[in-house]
Image: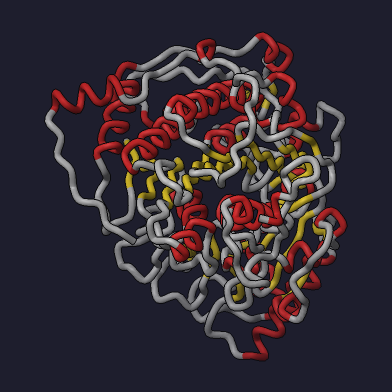
Amino acid sequence: MRPLRPVLIAPALLALATALAVPTVALADAAPASAPEAPPATPPRLILAISIDQFSADLFAQYREHFTHGFARLQQGAVFPQGFQSHAATETCPGHSTLLTGVHPARTGIVANDWFVPGLARADKEVYCVEDETNPKSTPDDPVVTTKHLKAPTLGDLLKRKNPRTINAAVSAKDRAAVMMSGHDTDAVYWFKDQGFTTFEDRRISKAVVAENAAMAARVNAGDGDLAAPDWCGTLDRATQMGGFTIGTYKFPLKAGDWKAYANGPRIDDATGEMALRMVDELGMGKDAVPDVLSVSFSATDKVGHAYGTEGVEMCIQLARLDATLGRLFDALDQRGIDYEVVLSADHGGFDAPERLAQQGYPSAQRIDPALTGKALGQAISAETGIAAPSGPLLFGGGSSGDIWVAAGLTPDQRHTVIAALVKKLAAHPQIAAVYTADELANMPVPQGAPQDWTMEQRVRASFVAGVSGDVLMMTKRGVVPGKPRPGAVATHGSPWDYDRRVPMLFWRKGMIGFEQPDPVETVDIAPTLAATVGLVEPKGTWDGRCLDIAAGEADSCAR
């Protein structure tokens, strides 16, 4: 990684840069894309890899007719509405780890957003997916960010290995998204923390970041009113009772100085798009024949989905706003004369609040039984077997479709007894669809073939890593939602079911002939597809996915 030098900017120059670099444009000002021109015969100069956090195939299908800006342009390209994050661990970190590595989490090493290491030599046994847990300053909530847990190279890594002049950069509101998409050999990686974009501990933020942080601070300090809801959001603008509070009518007012509201609503995507464009200019991306990679993960769809669910006016406002943000980004790249290729997909899907689903034809949607948390299960198994951990809890994890770890310090016989009792208890629970042990999964091959046909155990195997994943993995039944509802957290994802696995995959480049292909594809197909368009050839076995021919007609984009 190349460290960036600290930068000092005179206040007058900073004000000028803030005013001129990326002007704020109202939603109504973002113009639709112009008609396509003839496709260039040479490879694109810039790969723009976009992830929309928690953008399910269901949301894409629901809203695609209303998009008029950035999403509308992408729908003129190669549209794969049935993309799959094929694995069971449908969370942000595992999902982002597949997008530009071309391999499943079983090979990226990223089994979840967080996992437990019962023998870890610190009081908190939880490890965050981009955390250097060996650093005394690091905690899962305030991590010292690292790439060390990502075990596969990204497209940017491979291109820089081929030619060090390739620029590999990323930006997101989430550290894990930026790190997983950019990889190990990077020129600039930024994510939002507290009151601005930041980067790795051994680097310094650049002039572009200083300018964007100043622009954000000005907006937050000024405050803002409700965000506009398009007319077609009207039927979604109604309250749903959640027990002490409601969702479905919030329009994201911004009180002056409220950074939390800014960071957790649609406005953070505006800033992410602006930061991406500043990086293009500062780094000189797309300026020569050596292809560059800019990864941009927009996080607000996930933040809105968790806080307000997927079927209220909040999500409608969010996606309309994001459509305009994408349009501004594409228009700005056009104005700079950059030949770029876009891929847009998602790290996972999502599910609405069961309280609202119960009113909309899904009466069996329900909250998970609190007895399925690691703490409750550990107490029950300890009482049943008479086995207790030498210190601390007997079990870690649980609480959703996922992993459960057994405490360190037990004898082999004790571990065997605890695991057997746990499997039996989970298998008898009415909310559990399947239970697997680590030993069972370790002996299975990583699955191949059409992802919609995978069995449950194949989905689980695709995100299982021996020695990192849990000792026991439980999969909840369809429609079971983890967590007790509270303001700011009413819905989630993470299940092995298709509402969490299915995501759209869209490819676009100026002049390409558009088409729609309903055949199921995988997010691990993205990296080999993009590699082909820039002439990158890697040995067989580099990717779990396959190259998708995105050149309609007799030409084959995979044959370059």
- Image side of residue 407 versus residue 543, left or right: left
Spot occupied by residue 116 in the image (x, y as percentages of width and height): 53, 68
Quadrant where the C terminus is found in the figure: bottom right
**Image point 87% across, 57% down: which residue?**
453
Which of 522 and 54 lies nearest the eye of the viewer?
522
**Image point 34% across, 43% down: which residue?**
283
Tell me where residue 365 sits by quadrant: top right
Kindly tell me whether residue 248 is visible in this rendering.
Answer: no
**Image point 41% across, 33% down: which residue?**
277
Counting labels gives 0
Furthest toward the front, the residue is: 41
Kindly tell me whether residue 57 is visible in this rendering.
Answer: yes
Which of 430 and 518 lies nearest the eye of the viewer?
518
Q: Is residue 402 above or below residue 259?
A: below
Question: By what rule are the colours in the image chosen?
Answer: secondary structure
Q: Is residue 254 above or below residue 522?
A: above
**Image point 70% across, 54% down: which residue?**
558
Tell me where residue 487 sits by quadrant: top right
Quadrant where the N terminus is found in the figure: bottom left
Which of 140 and 267 lies nearest the eye of the viewer?
267
Spot occupied by residue 480 in the image (x, y as percentages of width and height): 76, 47
Spot occupied by residue 491 in the image (x, y as percentages of width and height): 65, 38
Spot occupied by residue 234 in the image (x, y as percentages of width and height): 69, 11
